[in-house]
Image: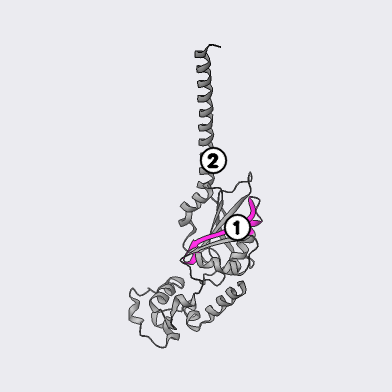
Amino acid sequence: MCPAVLKASVGYRTRMRLSALCWLHLFTAGRLAQIATFPQTHQVMMRDGICLATDVYGSTLEVRRPALLMRTPYNKGGARAIAERFAAAGYVAVVQDTRGAHAWEGRYVHYNNDDQDGFDTIQWIVQQAWSNGKAGMWGSSHPGAVQWLAAADRAPGLVAVAPTAAPSSLYHTLYQDGALRFGLTAGASVVINPPPPGITAPKDLTQFYHHLPLATLDQAIGWPMPWLKGVLAHEFFGQCREMLWQCL
């Protein structure tokens, strides 16, 4: 074969090989994008029969993958962008509305069920056909704090947590040197235990800063707030502290 023909032949094969690689890359990227863009929503049953809405991104029966879980009261749809990134990177991203949040089943009481619900959700994950048996958790603020509770219950398959802006001591978040951080606590209470129909939350809570006794603070604001009463009675912190000490 003359040099000119040989050179042309090699160039043709090289172009064809590059073209095939480009098509393969586009197909793979398109496949990952398709997997990430269309989450599957499951109703995952907890031990007491309550079902929690759970979005799963990136699951495929072709390959068993590790999962990354976020549990949030802030609407699972808000984590879609980062869940898609995790799915494109080869993980299965799982985002769940916590108990009672966004009209899903159960009653929302801040952190009250998050230890057993986290345990049950991770147990569900590792039993799925697409799971390789390993799960991690991510999230900040409330989605970060629930990771400590799931870890304290030693959920089988939970191998990593990445809590951000999530204190390991809720007591020292809401109390400083024994004094209640009223602005933070009262503001959180209005969100955690919102007013019932027909009652409007006060726009300015500073008017209640000097209210005594603290035991009737929710009545002064305008409606019953079980979470606030638990914080003031310290019962809530005792339960959380006991779970964390067991973890250690």
Read off the residue under disc 2: 31
Image quadrant in which you'd find residue 199: bottom left
Assess whether residue 127 is covered by the magenta stretch. Answer: yes
* SS label for mark 1: strand
Q: Quadrant of the N terminus?
A: top right
Q: Which residue is mark 1?
A: 135
The span shown in magenta is 124-143
Q: Tell me the residue at 50%/17% (across/down).
A: 7
Residue at far top of view: 2
The amino acid on which the numbered mark 1 sits, given as a three-letter code, is Ala
* Three-letter code, disc 2: Arg
Q: Earlier in the sequence, mark 2 or mark 1?
A: 2
Camera-side residue: 15 or 44? 15
* Residue farthest toward the bottom in the current orientation of the protein: 213
Q: Residues within 10 Å of mark 2 (few under 14, many from 20)?
A: some
Pick the quarter of the image with the C terminus: bottom right
Q: Position of residue 178 (x, y in %)?
A: 44, 84
* Residue 14: image location, x then y, percent: 52, 25
